[in-house]
Image (cartoon, helix red, strand yellow):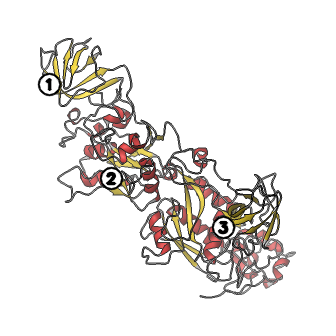
Amino acid sequence: MHIRKLRSLTAGAATFGAVALAATLVLGSGVASASPADPPGGATPVAPHFYNGNVAAIRDSGSDTTFFMMQKIGDLYTGAGLYGCVLNGLAGASATNYNSSDPAQSSSNVASFCAANSNISTTDVNDNWDRTEVSQGVDDVGSGAGQAQLCGSTPSPLTVDFARSSKPAGTACSTLVETGYAKDGIPVVDYPVNPSTYGTSTFSGYDTVNGGNIGPVTSGWLPGDPVGGPYNGSALSDISNIDNGGSTGSTAYRLWCQTSLTGVNPRISDWGQLTNLGPNLEVVNVTTSSGSTNVTVSGSFPASVAAGQSVSGPGIPSGTTVSSVSGGSLTLSASAGANASNATLTFAIGTTLAEGQGVPIGLPIRIMGVNTSSGTEATFASYANSGNANTGCSSSMNPNAANDPNPATAPSPNSAHVALENNSDQINEFAVGDFPSPDFVDQAIEVSTTLYIESNGVLNTNPYAAASTIDGTSYAGNKLTENGGRTPTTPNLLSNAYPTARTLFNIYRSDTVRASTAGFLNWICDGNVNFQKGLDNSTGKNFDTELNGIIGTTFGFPRLTDVSPASAVGTPADNLAAPNNTCSASLPISTTSGSNTITLTAGGNFPPDITNAGSLPSPVNNVTVAGTGIPAGDFVVSGAGTSTLTLNAAATANGSGVNADFLGVPSVTVVGSSQN
């Protein structure tokens, strides 16, 4: 590998500060005044940048959720190493005679004022001074796959330096360390498509539901309702893993994890179980006889149908009530006026049933399977499984994933539809494969009956990935709330109050992390506290401001930094830890009750950048320390780079191996490989 010698910029640069200021968009931040010295580094690179004079290429692999975001961040960091120019006195220019109107001195000819060196040092020492080049891998996509490739347990065609991950570090190897730089959530999504827009289905199975003229089931349409409304059903709005007693009784468990259609908490497999809840309850496929008060249904009438309730439907006289009901036979107070074998009767039951307890309508719920290597799938599987070990979704969220319902196109064997996470367009791609165009009505029925999960950030910022398309019309996915109305707002995500809140990580190996990788991860994590990022000469914006924009605005993920405090709720209802403070350094320390000094349990010196973190938010102006036995708000007074740190307040307990978080200090403090 080519070694770029560490060197100070020439003194001549200071003379031409005015020239640099006038041409700042070309010359790079940091040259407007005296030239900065070379940053610390060399044979033993030091935190937080770990500069060593080498130009290195680093590569990640893993999560689909963060792939495009990390592309933007990687490009920003790579581009930060572009700018640098050691000014000299060519063409007679000086700080006093620089003339911007002189073509010879214009920004387009700025090379005339730069030292003649093909690879000069960058002038911005806090933003990729080593000129590291970052790329994103797409081989074997998924958080788990990225971690496995990083650990070497899964082959990779190219080296993986860190893993993109939307789930915590697993057990692929014992040295994985998380740096959590953003928050996200995983809502369930349905699609408010009205299939009747495209005609009437003649497909066997769909054609028996209201004669194939099907309305938007997610909006509460039931057979017998006008396809354009109003609807007697309840629109699906919420999915919970704590309702009906939680555990195996929850709606989430019975939709995704329960495979049995019988028993105490059977699988929810029909849309009517979610939407046909009353108080106007519809019962389909009822047989009536003209002139008879007796009506029958295959199986039994719902237990919620009782004597005295009003009943209406085709051929049923106005004001008719239920006289009696037993099993699959019911007696009306007035004779039916028509023969029918598939009538839909509506019963005013006077109450609303719990979600999941509704009456089937003959339209199956389609659960879209999701790539089992993904953090999205792992998080939701844990949520739906409701803490039930070795059951249902313990291995994946896909036991009830739907397959191709059309015998004419179904493969043999007919395998489940499993998509990558975070792209609703794949749903209509499956539908087109199952019902080739121009069968748009059956494509629409397939999409309208599908439940999918997707990243909240993707849903908020990528209209194409958030929608499914039928015959050129895109239908935006509808985010359902969780656990009784919880929405994926920024406060709910940051506090882990949203049941499927999660942290988005970049994960490295503490035993092998390269200096170049460590510097990049620390650059992402630091919130302009440990060091001040410079000006992006291509935009005129501070690099940290651009990071905020990429993460929070472009991709819709609330950003976490090395000053983000720990959330009061460490683990949301999905049972996977989602910490907010892993971008800050966490070090095992030893404390003595009553003493304000601490040491590293493993010995050695504390990172030298601890007290050089600049100012944290008022009123604390030093690095804040948090951990067991450390008083709230305690901070470092002195001792960076030595074996003993002095804190502002004394510890309240004796401890050894206590993990202390140093807010304002980015995560990586030691590297496993210093010269690359």
Point out residue 199 in the picture as x, y percentages from the top left corner. 25, 38
Residue in front for this viewpoint, 8 or 338: 338
Q: Which residue lies under the disc numbered 3?
A: 523
Mark 3 vs 2: CB contact within 8 A = no
Tell me, yes or no, if residue 216 can be seen here. no
Asked which secondary structure carries label 3, the reply is helix
Inspect the image, locate mark 3, and give the three-letter code of the amino acid beneath it.
Answer: Trp
Name the quadrant of the C terminus. bottom right
Q: Is residue 93 left or right of residue 317?
A: right
Find residue 399 and name its label: 2
Q: Is residue 204 left or right of residue 624?
A: left
Inspect the image, locate mark 2, and give the three-letter code of the amino acid beneath it.
Answer: Pro
| C-alpha distance separating marks 1 and 3 | 71 Å
Q: Quadrant of residue 318?
A: top left
Residue located 36% across and 57% down the image:
419
Find residue 86 and name its label: none
Q: Nearer the viewer, mark 3 or mark 2?
A: 2
| C-alpha distance separating marks 2 and 1 | 38 Å
Q: Quadrant of residue 349?
A: top left
Inspect the image, locate mark 1, and give the three-letter code of the amino acid beneath it.
Answer: Ala
Q: Earlier in the sequence, mark 3 or mark 2?
A: 2
